[in-house]
Image (cartoon, rainbow, N blue to C red):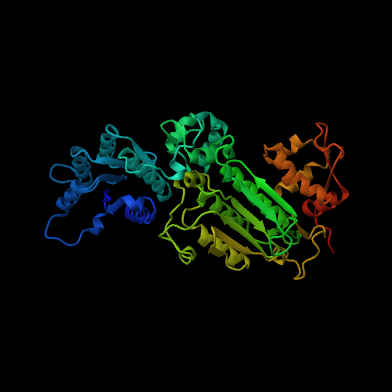
Amino acid sequence: MKQRIFVSCVQKEFSKERQALKAYILGDALLSRFFDVFLFEDIPAKDRRADEVYLEEVRRCDIYLALLGDQYGVPDKKGFSPTHREFTEATNLGKYRIIFIKGMTDKDRHAKMKQMIEEAGEQLVRRRFAEIEELIPGVYSSLVEYLAVKELLRVGPFDAAVCPGATIEDISAEKVSKFVGLARRARAFPLAEDTAFENVLEHLHLLNQGRPTNAAILLFGKAPQKYLISSEVKCAHFHGTQVSKPIPFYQVYKGDVFDLVDQAVDFVLSKINLAVGTREHSVQAPVAYEMPPEVVREAVVNAVAHRDYTSNGSVQVMLFSDRLEVWNPGTLPPSLTLEKLKRPHGSVPANPLLAEPLYLTKYIERMGTGTGDMIKRCKKAGLAEPKFALTDGFVITIKRKPELAFESVGGRKEAPSRHQVGTKLALSGNQVEVLDKCKEDCFIVDLMQLVGRSDRTKFRNQVLKPLIEEGFLLMTIPDKPTSSKQKYRLTDKGKAMLKNLRKKDTKK
């Protein structure tokens, strides 16, 4: 028999939140097995007072879930609003109560709502939220905890389960602190940057009885692949349209989910065409990729955030001459179809506890809108609509149009050779910075610091190696690549490239 959830709130204040919660719970493969949701909109017309019906529903429910905001509601003769009476009834009956408060401060709240929040705070743990995207993962976590407490769920969902063998020592306090700083600037995250990292993890529901969950390790682990081997991302570049050997470029990226996204996106942007125009109409030369970087990023984030981490497969990013394919071992939730992905749809994240920190740092802009944004951006850029498909996993395919970058900055229809300096380039922003720095001989540590990288091997393979292979950069001690005295120097070809990127155009 399903557990009945009664959602209580001031009726006029949480219309979107109520509907979003119900849709999410009933659409989630796990939660829909255990829960049913009651909203006051579900009551048919009756010859009874509404407040009496609501109190009866409180008595029938297994879980009382309250959303509290600024408004208090209309008080009765005794001075209590319907929401307050429902909370009191649930308390007196010993119902399992979950309280979410909208807003980080109580400054603008009705005085009696403040009083109700204080009353609730004396009895149970409350949680605050700012937007629906924060509310849904919080409710998800609370309901999973309820299932565990009631012993209705013997095996927890992947991201909420304890990571086998991992301890709190496997969490990087530095990564957590960096996250808090980003989240505060991006989404007004309420915790301070000097908050103890254990408290941050608790706030994000990433600890289970003091032990890190799988989501905690994926987000902030010192070495996530030590425990979750398949969480790596495999990137490959093929010159043709089919998978074939030898593979011109193949790289396996490791690290936390933020690292994986950044590295995979950099991989794609370093391989696709980047065109730099002239300063004919502006002091700054226009720059354009053959496909919008935001689309590439969304495809990669989608794969990393929503994949099935219980699978032995890894996310694969494959760049062909005619397309980009991003594959992940996962599927769509029951409430979504491939056709619905093309239209506005509700958010049903496969790993909500993993997705929330990605949202808080703007890796995910808005949950549930990513695929629609990809379609809009591709159409605006003159690209074909991205293709979504289910094979032995979920794959996003984005068609390439190599000449698009050149045309976008005012070039002629016929794209020049890839090696024609100053017209069509295949460099990432980090690589351009490195070239500029290497006008004077530089050690690798100085270059890594310049672009904010910490992994020497990945930086050498991803950033420096392609520049050396293109002839833009050389090693001062080529026969000892890893020498502690090794420096990197800009070549004449590299100088010519920078001249087109950085100096005033000497055309005509």
Return the residue nearer the eye: 205 or 276: 205
Taking the image as drawn, is residue 107 in sight? no
Q: Position of residue 132 (x, y in %)?
A: 40, 50
Q: Can you say whether 482 is above or below 276 in the image?
A: above
Residue 458, quarter of the rendered image: top right
Return the residue nearer the eye: 128 or 200: 200
Q: Position of residue 368 (x, y in %)?
A: 46, 56
* Residue in the picture at 58% in, 50% down: 314
Q: Can you say whether 297 is above or below 106 in the image?
A: below
Return the residue nearer the eye: 327 or 500: 327
Residue 62, quarter of the rendered image: top left
Return the residue nearer the eye: 384 or 504: 384
Q: Position of residue 211 (x, y in %)?
A: 46, 32
Q: Which of the image's four quarters has the C terminus? A: bottom right
Q: Position of residue 110 (x, y in %)?
A: 28, 42
* Number of residue marks: 0
Residue 69, quarter of the rendered image: top left
Taking the image as drawn, is residue 457 in sight? yes
Q: Is residue 443 left or right of residue 378?
A: right
Q: Is residue 128 left or right of residue 159?
A: left
* Residue in the picture at 69% in, 63% down: 242
